[in-house]
Amino acid sequence: MLKAKVTVTLKKSILDPQGSAVEKALKSMGYKVDEVRIGKFMEVTLPEAARENATEMMHEICHKLLSNPVIEDYSFELEDKE
Amino acid sequence: MKIGIVRFPGSNCEVDVWEAWRVLGQEPKMLWHQETSVRGYDLIVLPGGFSYGDYLRTGAIARFSPIMEDVIHFAHEGGMVLGICNGFQILTECGLLPGALLRNKDLHFLCQPQYLRVERTDLAFTSLYQEGEVIQIPINHGEGNYSIDDAGLKELEENGQVVFRYVDKTGVENELGNPNGSRHNIAGIVNRTGNVLGMMPHPERVVEEIVGGTDGQRLLLSLVQAWERRMQYGA
């Protein structure tokens, strides 16, 4: 079996109010941080039969549903699942 | 006039919309999200709520529910579609309207009356308003922060696609009057062909004095009037 680890982040040009709130909290706790951006992490498990077209299919899945290309970027890694 | 209101799992304003139309003398029908056809309808309303629990992104999963394929087809053929709140979010997710709705700027969920300025009155949705008129319609959302890239924003403005803008009491668009951080104080937009309108405020909640106002009434009545005109003259 295969596992796809998907990361979805807001595009750089999009303000991230959640990230800013967390950033302020960290600063008020005394940590020296520059910026916090919040994204999403997803794991998609694929059957052996999907191995051949896995990359292509994951791009399609990410583009159609897992991310909204208007506001988000995505990336993924494929790895063997034990 | 045949009005269909799409009910998704997690919708919670569909009965308000239904009731609003009934107050105005219409008999709308509820459509379950698993239906596959909206043929024969004059107007499809996507109501507010939390379709699919807002999982992943607001409207993201509803966009792929069986009925949406035909709603998209219906819209492309010129059918009238009104998306309110979560309905607006679904319309941006499925690409019928540009942009996206993000978390409110200050992260608060907002439920309050809101002043809006009507920017266009040449649409089937707004013909009974006055251009530049300030109306009050409530908002009720956590993700209403309208976002679009600079090129998209320019296009929207140049084509006059902004229908409602958040303003202060005097009708001026400023930061004070902008509840959620939306670009250019955008509260509602229409597609290029004028048949798909998405808006965050809830017109269905202000159609009777007893519930706090009637400023939403004319939006629904404009649609009825446009339909009657179509029936009379054909189009």
Image (cartoon, rainbow, N blue to C red):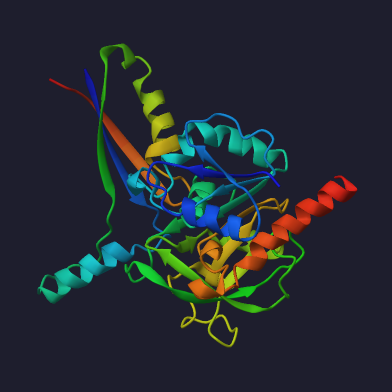
Q: Is residue B98 visible?
A: no
Q: Is residue B114 above or below residue A80?
A: below
Say which quarter of the image contains residue B61.
top left
Q: Is residue B113 above or below residue B62?
A: below
- Coordinates of residue B21 in the picture (x, y in percent): 60, 56
**In front of the other: B50 or B23:** B23
Q: Among all residues in the image, which is located at the extreme right? A: B233
Residue at point 48%, 68% (across, down): B182
Of residue A40 and residue B217, the one placed in the foreground of this image is B217
Say which residue appears at 73% left-offset and 75% top-offset: B130
State the residue in front, A67 or A76.
A67
Look at the image and tell me in which quarter the C terminus of chain B lies.
top right
Q: Residue at x 71, y 47 (%)?
A: B1
Please state the horizontal and vertical placement of residue B185, each as a whole percent of the image: 53, 72
Q: Would residue B41 appear left or right of A27 to someone viewing this image? A: right
> Where residue A82 appears, x then y in whole percent?
12, 20
Question: Relative to B26, does residue B169 appear above or below in the rendering?
Answer: below
> Where is residue B52, by image quadrant?
top left
Q: As drawn, which residue projects farthest toward the bottom?
A: B170
Answer yes or no: is residue B1 visible. yes
Decide if residue B95 is on the left or right side of residue A14: right
Q: Residue furthest top?
A: A49
Front in this rendered view, residue B219 or A28: B219
Q: How many marks?
A: 0
What residue lies at 49% left-to-right and 62% top-to-bottom? B146
x and y, in percent, of residue A73 in the image: 39, 46
